[in-house]
Image (cartoon, rainbow, N blue to C red):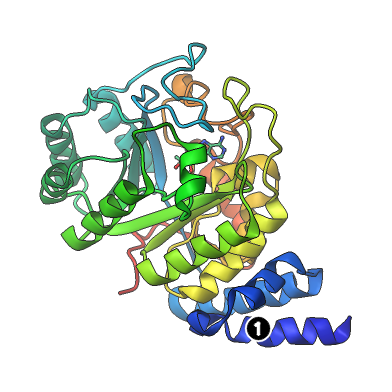
């Protein structure tokens, strides 16, 4: 047992030069993981994170602008064919109100996230981004609005958007096709990610942990993709079934594996901005704190108007009124402090 842990310890020390590690060794690190491995990984991950970002945990105000979506991703509660989903969209005035509230609460990054909704054309978004940036020049605007054309990404960037989140969802083509309807492809997703990065966005990819059909080999592919793409941000969280989707009876991913992978990702890319996600906070009430202790350094409280939060229902039981709610930032702050880290109001750009 001791030798096994010692061997894993040696593997963990070698994670940064990840490409040298064979699939067999990585499979071992994931499949034969012990609590001791997780603790060592987390400790190393925290150290690496602190070397770069010090004691800071960054906060982002998440504004869920629309629950309309033209896509039909099999795992997602706001998929087009879910007739039970309550649809809403925020108009630019409402979004600006959220920013005003968020600014007063100390947020210096606004994340506009939504389904792929044609209402938000380039013209509307460029004008909105321009208004946010001129009202709050000390703030970053992050977009998370799915796949758009290269031209659109460029226009939004030129209008002032700083960052873009677009999870790759899985780096395995066949697995991608099992999670998405015909018409969506991994190839296209990767193309979008490359485009975003080359335009100059701080770019984020990511995947769900424990999504249906996911194997350890898929996870290894995800890790290899992340290492080679070198994103500025990585979002991972456990898959959680949604009652009105084809995956309603599939088991959820675990907080334990999510935390383990957060630590691995921190060691692969020491500078990455890594959130302890809402899904992690949903599956485990201490998920945020555990995420920070495993190497995450970002939290994204919900800044959407209270009356729409329930409607942005990607999965069952999404938390949105506790510490993850922007108005409870004081409570969140004290909870983060129990980890020895500090929630900061800084804009929190990538450490280039
Ligand atoms: N469980 C967990 N995460 C989900 N997402 C969508 N549906 C679910 C679900 N059922 C994630 C996807 C998407 C992000 C916005 O939310 O990874 O990219």
Picture quarter with the C terminus:
bottom left
Residue at left offset 45%, top offset 21%: 308
Vertical side of 10 occupied by 133: above or below: above
Residue at left offset 70%, top offset 28%: 249
Respond yes or no on whether mark 1 lies under 8 Å from ligand 1.
no
Query: Which residue, as the protein is rendered here, is positioned at the far front?
Result: 174
Q: Is residue 58 visible?
A: yes
Vertical side of 49 occupied by 171: above or below: above
Describe residue 313's horizontal placement relative to residue 193 as left or right. Answer: right
Q: How many marks?
A: 1
The quadrant where residue 35 appears: bottom right
Q: Residues within 10 Å of mark 1 (few under 14, many from 20)?
A: some
Q: Residue 162: horizontal and vertical position, in percent?
A: 23, 54
Picture quarter with the N terminus:
bottom right
**Of residues 351 and 266, which is closer to you in this image?**
266
Residue at left offset 19%, top offset 62%: 198
Q: Is residue 230 visible?
A: no
Query: Which residue, as the protein is rendered here, is positioned at the far top?
Result: 83
Q: Secondary structure at mark 1?
A: helix
Residue at left offset 48%, top offset 11%: 83
Residue that mark 1 sits on: 11
Q: Residue 269: horizontal and vertical position, in percent?
A: 45, 73
Describe residue 217's horizontal placement relative to residue 123 as left or right. Answer: right
Q: Residue 244: horizontal and vertical position, in percent?
A: 58, 20
Q: Residue 59: horizontal and vertical position, in percent?
A: 44, 53
């Amino acid at each position: 047992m001791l030798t096994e842990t010692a061997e894993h310890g040696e593997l963990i020390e070698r994670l940064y030069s990840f490409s040298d590690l064979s699939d067999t060794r990585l499979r071992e690190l994931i499949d034969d993981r012990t609590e001791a491995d997780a603790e060592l990984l987390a400790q190393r991950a925290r150290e690496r994170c602190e070397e770069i970002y010090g004691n800071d945990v960054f906060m982002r105000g998440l504004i869920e602008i629309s629950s309309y979506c033209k896509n039909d991703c099999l795992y997602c509660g706001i998929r087009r064919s879910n007739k039970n989903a309550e649809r809403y969209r925020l108009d630019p005035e409402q979004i600006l109100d959220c920013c005003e509230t968020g600014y007063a609460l100390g947020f210096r990054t606004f994340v506009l996230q939504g389904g792929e909704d044609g209402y938000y054309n380039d013209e509307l978004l460029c004008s909105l981004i321009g208004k946010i940036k001129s009202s709050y020049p000390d703030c970053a605007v992050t977009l998370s609005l799915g796949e758009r054309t290269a031209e659109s990404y460029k226009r939004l960037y030129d209008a002032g958007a700083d960052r873009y989140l677009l999870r790759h969802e899985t780096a395995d083509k066949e697995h991608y096709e099992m999670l998405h309807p015909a018409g969506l492809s991994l190839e296209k997703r990767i193309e979008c990610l490359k485009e975003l990065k080359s335009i100059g966005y701080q770019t984020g990819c990511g995947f769900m942990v424990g999504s249906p059909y996911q194997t350890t080999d898929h996870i290894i592919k995800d890790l290899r993709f992340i290492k080679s793409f070198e994103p500025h941000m990585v979002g991972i969280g456990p898959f959680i079934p949604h009652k009105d989707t084809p995956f309603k009876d599939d088991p959820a991913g675990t907080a334990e594996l999510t935390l383990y992978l957060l630590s691995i990702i921190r060691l692969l890319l020491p500078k990455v901005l890594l959130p302890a996600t809402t899904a992690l906070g949903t599956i485990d009430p201490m998920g945020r704190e555990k995420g920070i202790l495993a190497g995450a350094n970002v939290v994204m409280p919900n800044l959407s108007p209270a009356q729409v939060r329930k409607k942005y229902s990607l999965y069952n039981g999404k938390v949105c009124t506790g510490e993850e709610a922007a108005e409870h930032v004081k409570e969140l702050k004290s909870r983060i402090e129990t980890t020895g880290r500090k929630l900061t109001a800084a804009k929190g750009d990538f450490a280039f």
